[in-house]
Image: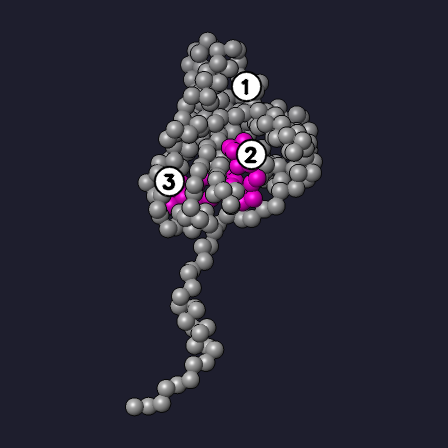
Amino acid sequence: MGKARKLRSTDFERTELFCRQPEIMSLLLPFKLDLQAAEAELSSFEAWFSTVGFVNEKIVVDEIKSRPHMSILIGTIGNVVVPDLYKWELGLGGLYRTDFVVGNNNLRRFLLVEFEGANEFSLFGKKGTAQYRNWSPELEHGFGQTVDWASYHSYHKTDATLESNFGGPIKSANYLVICGRDKGIVGPLEHQRLTYRREHVRVEGIQAQVLTYDEMLVSLKQTLEMFKTV
């Protein structure tokens, strides 16, 4: 019987490597929100937005992307109180893609955002009658995306890839479609229809919010004012 080999420190290092749990490689990026920077970016976006009238999706989203602190503040609309994670154009399972994800790492709470155009017919389309216009294809596309995200999450709650992409479990997820402008809404009936849709239409019991870009601005300004009082 041979002599027992004396253990070396490298043996413990090898054992540690085998026993160590693999790190979760999140696709979400960390971010530290600066409220002063967010306020400055929001003011500059509001000034720009007031000059453009109606505008297509790519142009308005590029303007939002160029303002990172304002962008991540959008998470507060979906109850992500202190957003510190984000990702533009996050793929889900190779089938779906969300325009923007904002989250809080500690609470594992997320908001998935779909942007549509800020055009005249982004909310209500050209079809229908003068008294009753149909919902626009843009809005229906954006809302359809939220249904797809919710269904994917529902069927893949224990999926390791989904959890890895989000850097951990998803404890709660909210959905938001930002589409159209206030001045694209014609008459009290369209205001009533949009209000009912945003307040009563839910996906898996979760309110799927629909805001115009103007309403997004108002909400973000209110959030900043609230933070100033804390």
In this rendering, the label closer to the viewer, 2 or 3:
2
Answer few, some or many: residues within 10 Å of disc 1's Cα (few below 14, many 20 plus, some between 14 and 19): some
The region drawn magenta spans 74-103
Q: Amino acid at mark 3?
A: His
Q: Amino acid at mark 1?
A: Gly
Q: Amino acid at mark 2?
A: Thr
- Sequence order check, earlier mark of 2 and 1: 2
Q: Is residue 85 left or right of residue 221?
A: left
Mark 1 vs 3: CB contact within 8 A:
no
Q: Secondary structure at mark 1?
A: helix
For the N terminus, the image quarter is bottom left
Residue depicted at 44% across the width and 28% down the height: 208
Q: Which residue is mark 2?
A: 76
Q: Is residue 99 visible?
A: no
- Sequence order check, earlier mark of 1 and 3: 3
Specify the quadrant of the image occupied by residue 136: top left
Residue 101 painted magenta: yes
Please determine whether, in this image, residue 73 is positioned above or below residue 1. above
> Could you tell me how far apart the alpha carbons at marks 2 and 3 are, in whole angstroms?
21 Å
Q: Give the image location of residue 87, x and y in percent.
A: 52, 44
> Could you tell me how far apart the alpha carbons at marks 1 and 3 are, in whole angstroms?
33 Å
Mark 2 vs 1: CB contact within 8 A:
no
Answer few, some or many: residues within 10 Å of disc 3's Cα (few below 14, many 20 plus, some between 14 and 19): some
Q: Which mark is residue 184?
A: 1
Q: Which mark is residue 28?
A: none
Q: Which residue is mark 3?
A: 153
Q: Secondary structure at mark 2?
A: helix
Q: Give the image location of residue 121, x and y in percent.
A: 50, 21
